[in-house]
Each structure stands twice: as C-alpha cells, then as structure tokens.
Image (cartoon, helix red, strand yellow):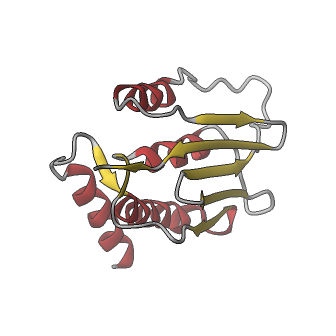
Amino acid sequence: KNYVNKLTQVYRYSLQKDHNEGLSLVVEEIEFVKAYLSLFQERFEDALDVSITVEGIGRDTYVPRLALQLLVENALKHNQFTIQNPILIEIFNEGSQLLVVKNNKKKHAHSNYKKEQSGIGLKNLMQRYRLLNQSQIEIINDPIYYIVKIPILKIR
C-alpha cells in the first residue's frame, strides 16, 4: 500500500501543470525526490543508501522542475550496485546558493557493458539554467564520486 501511495505521489507531481516557467519550489522538489527514491529503495533495499539533508532553505527558492529527479535517475542508470556493494546518493545544500547531488561510482563489472550515454538529460538541465540567465551547474567527476551542484534560484 505504501509503494502504491508513493507511486501515486510521483505520478501526480510529474503530471502537475507548471505555473512558474519550469521552476518548482525547492521544498516541493525535495519531497518529490524523497517519494521517487523510496520507490527504488523498495526495489533495491540495502543496495541503495540515500541521505537527504537540506536545511535552512526558504519558501521563496526554486530549481528547474524535476532537476533532482534527473540527477538521481542518472546516478541509478550509470552505476551497478548490489547489497554487498551499495550505491550512496547524497542530496544536500551548500548554504542557500547550491543543491548538491553526490553519488559514489560503481562501474559496471562487465567490460562489454554498453549503456547508451547520450548525456541529453544533463545537457537539457544546463540549457534550462542558461535560458534562466543564471549561473551554470557544476559537475565534478572524480575517480570515486560524481557530484552535480545546481544553483538555487530566487524569484523576485
């Protein structure tokens, strides 16, 4: 029953009309991504470790709609993880300026593994920030972690 309720919450949010030029309140995006991740935690159990600590964010702050979902989906899509070798996804803020999505890298074990990696989702997110005339997202791709920092926007 809990799974169906979360699935309903995810679909409802995904289908809502957009009233703020493609933006959502940070607090709403966080609640949405929590519901989204709970679906995957039900499926993958202890293979997926999630930490969300976003604090001190005002009700007047925004991010592009479904931005966090896209970053979480990329982490799940591009990594192989098991109960013995889990993936950790952390979402946190750096002050009132940035939201950060960080995951440890768990490369696919099979060398012949080919996943379509067009990067279109990340490119679209970068373009959305450009269209909003805001600072760009920051990507840190080191040997252990993949980190994306997205600006938190304020509408005057």
Vertical position of residue 25 compared to residue 126: above or below: below
Q: Is residue 13 above or below residue 9?
A: above
Q: Nearer the viewer, residue 136 or 144?
A: 136
Q: Residue 141 occupies which quadrant of the picture? A: top right
- Can you give x and y, in whole percent of width and height, for residue 1 in the image? 33, 79
Quarter of the image for residue 13 reads: bottom left
Q: In the rendering, at what x and y percent does residue 89 appear?
A: 64, 57
Work out whether 124 lies above or below 93: above
Q: Residue at x 74, y 58 (%)?
A: 86
Q: Name the residue at 22% across, 59% down.
A: 12
> Residue 71's x, y, as percent?
53, 44
Q: Residue at x 38, y 62 (%)?
A: 32
Residue 34: image x %, image y %? 46, 66
Q: Observer-nearest residue: 56 or 102?
A: 56
Give the residue drawn at x 47%, y 23%.
120
- Residue at the extreme bottom: 1
**30 sits left or right of 104 in the view:** left
Q: Is residue 73 left or right of residue 154?
A: right
